[in-house]
Image: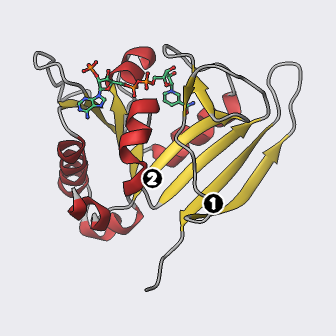
Amino acid sequence: METIKKNKFPIVSIVAVSKDFIIGDGNKMLWHLPNDLKRLKSITFGNPLIMGRKTFDSIGKPLPGRANIILTNKKNLKDDIQLEKFFVQSFEDAVIKANNWIIKKFKKNEHSAKRIFIFGGGEIYKLALSFCSQIELTMVDINLKNGVTFPSIDENEWGKKILKKVEGNDSYPSHSFWLYNRRVIRL
Ligand SMILES: NC(=O)c1ccc[n+]([C@@H]2O[C@H](COP(=O)([O-])OP(=O)(O)OC[C@H]3O[C@@H](n4cnc5c(N)ncnc54)[C@H](OP(=O)(O)O)[C@@H]3O)[C@@H](O)[C@H]2O)c1
């Protein structure tokens, strides 16, 4: 597992949270932000996604143009190479699959732009956050008390900057896009 911290490709969580860091109700997301979905697609397109089986089931189909690497303990689920849907049984295998997918699919000069995205949900963010060097975070300006949560972000370990703020309207709440970078600790 330690080698994952020095992985060839950066590992990045991508998530939308409420003010209380709630991400969903266990089955689905709790808001619909067309803006955020467009942004999610443009950031992740051409990169591998690592997600939990529950998140995959809630999306319902593999997302095109990306490797869909799904963590599960179930042993009978079948890959679909055409649709780039792959099942793995450990986080380590998920990262290996993501690395190999990039190396096989893209030329060497394209590798520097590639990132491996942690796509949720709660269990997988918890498993993966210590291996992430960045978090692409959408903060949705709503209060929710109950639900699946994103793990707490220690502000001593992370620097954050706001990228954009979007005012809400009748169809969706205000939200903002943030980039968190893990601070480099010099000994
Ligand atoms: N707001 C956001 O940005 C965002 C993003 C993604 C998801 N979500 C929300 O998050 C919620 C789902 O999150 P969740 O925590 O309930 O589930 P999850 O993390 O999506 O999936 C959990 C499943 O992953 C598998 N798994 C977990 N750890 C594993 C390990 N170490 N090895 C092998 N398999 C492992 C297990 O699958 P098996 O049961 O098959 O063994 C487990 O049941 C939904 O409400 C969804 O809408 C929100």
Residue closest to the eye, 121 or 171: 121
> Residue 175: horizontal and vertical position, in percent?
77, 38
Quarter of the figure that contains the N terminus: bottom left
- SS at mark 1 in the image: loop
Q: Are marks 1 and 2 in contact (CB under 8 Å)?
A: no
Q: Which quadrant holds residue 181? A: bottom right
Q: Position of residue 50 (x, y in %)?
A: 34, 39
Name the side, left or right, on which 142 lies relative to 26. Answer: right
Secondary-structure class at tag 2:
strand
State which tag comes first along the sequence, 1 or 2.
Answer: 2
In this picture, residue 44 sits left or right of residue 15: left
- For residue 18, what is the image quadrant? top right
Name the residue furthest bottom. 187
At a point 55% along the width and 64% down the height, the residue shown is 157
The answer to whether one can see residue 49 in this image is yes
The relative height of residue 110 versus residue 150 in the rendered view (above or below) is: below
Q: Which residue is mark 1?
A: 155
